[in-house]
Amino acid sequence: MSAKGDETIPEFGVKANSDDMRQTPTTQLASMMKEIGYTSVAISCKPEQFDGMIKAYRDVGIRVGAVFVGWTTDGESVSFNIPINLVFDRLRDTGAIVMIHTHVAKGARVTDQRIAEQLLQLAKQAEKAGVTIAIYPHVGNLLSTFEHAARVADAVDHPSLGVCFNLCHYLKQNDAKDLPSKLRAAKDRIKLVTINGAGVGNTQSMGWSKLIQQINQGEFDLRELLELICVKLEFDGPIFVQCYNLKAPARTILQETFKQWQCLKKHCRKPRHSTQRKPSDE
């Protein structure tokens, strides 16, 4: 969370996974983001790309605020699409978020209790590494819904593990009218938020081109959502923009997203507590 005057605003960036962003060399993309004004990014990549991406963003002074990692269990052991020790080592003591999309091995049957036990061990590792785990609800995954992920996070009950609120996957599986109550119920577990422009109405029947749009497009009221999450529910974690499957050139998406964020971020601001301790009070 960064401060401006007597107000606070969240860490902000993009999940750099649009079609053109995936095709653009990371060094070029990182320089483009820096030029536009970004200070943080969420990355999604293949294992062999991981180190190069981390270096490219850090070389231009952009914080790697979140990393997208696959987690698979067979009930006995877990595996990751990027070695988790490598992830923890590269992100050590940065406070970054490791977003995990969850899967079950073919033929395996795993209870929520067992998933929670395995995630608790991961949370303890994350705590030692100085990072946080956020379960990423995703259609078709083991923990596909926001509510299911939050229940498992409740069962884990560790400060270094929570959930990501992922707007597009929420709308694909839920009625938007239930959003305020479901966010309130899970507010203490939310570690990261991903937003995007989206349609309204029967969102569960919509395709991804309607559910994932640029934040300056779509009818969904992002201002109201941000006021609910950041002001009313007092969320103070990072917010990233979902760019998956967007077709515009990377520079266009980045410029228009950054411009729209300047309008949206005022809906995230809340007064800083006057009783906040000064560094000298520590």
Image: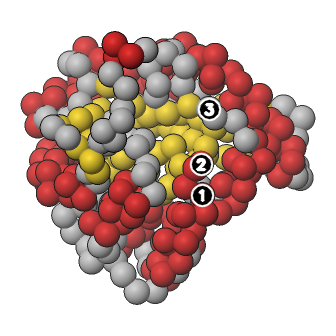
Circles 2 and 1, Cβ within 8 Å, touching? The answer is: yes
Q: Which residue lies under the disc numbered 1?
A: 186
The residue type indicated by label 2 comes to Arg
In this rendered view, identify the residue nearer to me: 162 or 122.
Answer: 162
Q: Is residue 268 visible to us here?
A: yes
Residue beneath the point at 59% across and 48% down: 189
**Which of the two labelled residues, at mark 2 and mark 3, occupies the earlier sequence position?**
3
Query: Real-space Cα distance between discs 2 and 3?
Result: 10 Å
Q: Which residue lies under the disc numbered 3?
A: 160
Residue beneath the point at 49% across and 33% down: 97
Q: Which residue lies under the disc numbered 2?
A: 189
How far across and how far down the image is residue 40, in percent? 29, 32
Q: How is the image coloured?
A: secondary structure
Query: Real-space Cα distance between discs 2 and 1?
Result: 6 Å
Residue beneath the point at 19% across and 54% down: 266
In this rendered view, identify the residue nearer to me: 165 or 35.
Answer: 165
Q: Is residue 19 visible to us here?
A: no
How far across and how far down the image is residue 152, in percent? 74, 51
Label 1: few (<14), some or many (≥20) within 10 Å? Answer: many
